Image (cartoon, rainbow, N blue to C red):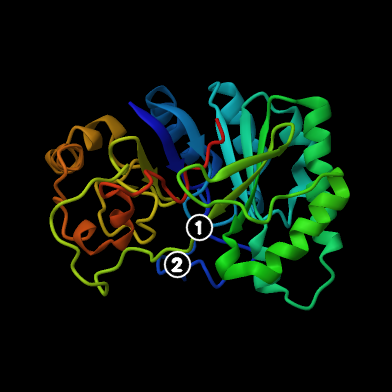
Amino acid sequence: MFKRVYLEISNICNVQCSFCPIVEKDNKLMDVTEFEEVLMQVAPLTEIVCLHLMGEPLAHPKFLDILALCEKYETRIDLTTNGILIDRYAENIVHSKCVRQVNFSLQAFRDNFPKRDIHPYIDPIFAFVKRAQEIKPSMYVNYRLWNQQSNASDNEEIFLLIEQEFDLEINRAIEVGAIKSKRIWNKLYLHFDSRFEWPSFLLPHQGTQGRCHGAVNHIGIHADGSVVPCCLDKNAVINLGNAKEQTLKSILESERFTKMRQGFMNGVLVEDFCQHCTFINRFKKGKPNVHPAVNNPV
């Protein structure tokens, strides 16, 4: 039914990046029992499960138990991480049968630690890529960066380190268009995107016409069980129900979800919250059909 389900195991992060909004919901970790109950319902409905919506998945104290459950239910997993804790779980991840892709948000380090030596952070991330190539060469790895127009100095530092580590040359005149992932070494990609505004009722009304991937090829489930149509609904404004209290099937068959999904497919923004989302403008005719969290290189 879906390309991806964003199953948030924790909305808690070990850093606070300027490009990520403050989570207004209470801090929440999804415990292992809750996760299994939800995963059992999610696994048959999606090609890929992403273990985040907000928060840092590797900071979950039971991450290995969660990874084991993903293997039990033969679920393909995409991980998005700031990379700070990668050394803790690198071997588990590269040997896991279920992890398909790992995305490193490399802009997080300088955003939080502008004066620190970057090597203790970046070297384990480089080592992870090489280890993955050795143990599981089918695993994709994305190094995610903001485009050069907004983060030129930070990107240049990382470019130079990548070039030195992998003995290659990165094209600085890279086009940030419809194809945002650029392969640079085996299954290692650079992925670029421009910053965007998180949906908010404080933003201007955008009209009632538009399309979105939300509810059509993905949904999100918050750590507290709230089901949302879009991975950008960080505070569960469009709360369709709770996967810990109802079956996911009943939520997805609800009148509200059905109307929203059909609306997106027909170019109509049914929900008022969607009518205040500026990201929806990226899907207008003539614009690249991209999504901030969908960065599959294949």
**Looking at the rendering, in which quadrant would you find the N terminus?**
top left
The percent position of residue 294, horizontal first and vertical second, equals 47, 42
- What amino acid is labelled 1 in the image? Asn
Question: Closer to the N terminus: mark 2 or mark 1?
Answer: 1
Name the residue at 68% across, 56% down. 172
The percent position of residue 148, horizontal first and vertical second, equals 60, 63
Given residues 21 and 211, the one toward you in this image is: 211
Label 1 element class: loop
| Label 1 crowd (10 A; few <14 / some 14-19 / many >=20) | many
Q: Can see residue 16?
A: no
The percent position of residue 19, horizontal first and vertical second, equals 52, 68
Name the residue at 28% across, 36% down. 216
Given residues 138 and 26, the one toward you in this image is: 138
Examine the rendered structure and indicate whether residue 59 appears above or below residue 22: above
Left or right of 100? Residue 227 is left
Left or right of 141? Residue 89 is right
Which quadrant would residue 182 be assigned to in this image?
A: top right
Instruction: List the residue tagged with mark 2.
Output: 23
Gap in Å between the C-alphas at discs 2 and 1?
A: 8 Å
Name the residue at 44% across, 42% down. 6
Q: Residue furthest front?
A: 173
- What amino acid is labelled 2 in the image? Val
Label 2 with label 1: CB-CB less than 8 Å: yes
Examine the rendered structure and indicate whether residue 90 appears above or below residue 271: above
Instruction: List the residue tagged with mark 1.
Output: 11
